[in-house]
Image: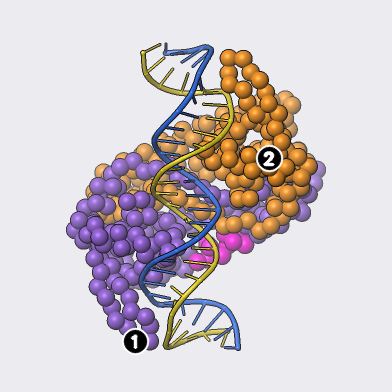
Chain colours: A orange, B purple, C yellow, D blue
DNA sequence: GTCGGCATGTAACTCGTTACATGATTCT
DNA sequence: AGAATCATGTAACGAGTTACATGCCGAC
């Protein structure tokens, strides 16, 4: 049982999904490839933490809809209470930026502009997700007792992070262009 | 040649170091274990991107001081100009927070307070590093032509990130404690 | 007619972590 | 007395990525 297995349990606990769907829903939590997801789902099923229902579809391939079991919810509940591992960031940009002194400022500017572009796109994507929640009359993101609450906070958190990154890029660009 | 190999080149390009030292200096860029660093150093040496000098010490074990070669600097320079891979964040806290609705608010509060404690400690550590740079009369972090510039920006960036995280925790704690 | 989405999976490989091995010195 | 720091490395394992395999549908 690794972090990804618990992330999967966390998603399945909210609403039954297929492995394919999980690939997208994990984006907010712990990005993973389908080739990692499918074997874990099988193991979770073996351990009786989830079970699935075969959904036959026409025009589309059949799919397995996974449900959490009581055992699964319980396992997740106890895991949450353990102290989480420290966050790890793998950001190639940082390595490149660290060595920009070896090149000229043009390279740095390109690097920063590219980063801005990426974060702008991500921010737009997550803003749409937030909008969907806010416009849905059946969802109240401020109700702390419901699962929407934490998802909403994580979505807005993401947008804030992207804004942070965009601001940082602008700050550095300003410093670089400030020819004194 | 993976990201870590370039991170190592980036550190060695600034000042010759031992593998053991690299373990600490990579913290700002790309955290890695020594068991990963040593084999990569050997491969970099094979490819003539770095070379080393054996330093004999008394009281301490001997060490290998690694230097970058012209070939190494060149390799790094061209790599910087390629578009970096998108950043990856592995944060278990997020998975746990996502599922707090399965438990009571006590668990969420503990989770947040623990996170605050961790980020406070990290912030202090990096603040000390910044202080060292600022108090060193031989270093001018605002000089864009020197390598101190980018290191200083990455250090202050880190402190900003930690502040962001601390603020976010406080915001969420306020929301949770707001019993309405 | 090719590309992306839907859908599930396996195999090979690379990357990263933990454990092991050694051994002196210094701090608590 | 035991832990931490300095210093280098290997071995085993777990996590993550890329490539492969299959196949239908709809859009451009």
Residue at 29% in and 52% down: A100
Magenta stretch contains residue B118: yes
Residue at 66% in and 38% down: A11
Q: Number of marks in the image?
A: 2
Whether callout 1 and callout 2 share a subunit is answered no
- In the orientation shown, which residue stands out farthest toward the right? B180
* Image x and y of residue A177, in percent: 30, 46
Between A20 and A98, which is closer to the camera in this rendering? A20
Are the residues at dot 1 and dot 2 in contact (C-beta closer than 8 Å)?
A: no
Vertical relation: C27 (above or below) A141:
below
Vertical relation: A66 (above or below) B116:
above
In the picture, the disc for residue A45 is 2
Q: Chain of mark 1?
A: B
Between A36 and B119, which is closer to the camera in this rendering? A36
- Lateral position of residue A91 relative to residue A63, left or right: left
Q: Chain of mark 2?
A: A
Q: Secondary structure at mark 1?
A: loop
- Lateral position of residue A17 relative to residue A31, left or right: right
Q: Which residue is mark 1?
A: B58
What is the CA distance from the residue labelled 1 to the residue labelled 2? Answer: 58 Å
User: Which residue range is magenta in the image?
Assistant: B116-125
Closer to viewer: mark 1 or mark 2: 2
Quadrant of res B57: bottom left
Mark 2 Cα shell of 10 Å, populated few (<14), some (14-19), many (≥20): some
């Amino acid at each position: 049982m690794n972090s990804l297995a618990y992330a999967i349990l966390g998603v399945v606990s909210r609403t039954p999904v297929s492995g394919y769907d999980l690939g997208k829903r994990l984006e907010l939590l712990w990005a993973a490839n389908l080739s990692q997801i499918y074997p874990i789902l099988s193991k979770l099923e073996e351990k009786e933490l989830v079970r699935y229902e075969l959904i036959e579809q026409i025009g589309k391939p059949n799919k397995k809809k996974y449900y959490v079991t009581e055992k699964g919810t319980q396992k997740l509940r106890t895991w949450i209470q353990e102290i989480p591992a420290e966050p790890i960031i793998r950001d190639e940009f940082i390595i490149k930026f660290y060595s920009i002194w070896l090149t000229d400022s043009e390279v740095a500017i390109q690097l920063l502009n590219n980063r801005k572009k990426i974060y702008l796109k991500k921010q737009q994507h997550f803003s749409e997700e937030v909008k969907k929640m806010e416009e849905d009359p059946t969802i109240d993101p401020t109700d702390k007792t419901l699962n929407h609450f934490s998802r909403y906070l994580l979505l807005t958190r993401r947008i804030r992070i992207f804004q942070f990154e965009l601001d940082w890029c602008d700050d550095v660009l300003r410093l670089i262009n400030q020819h004194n």
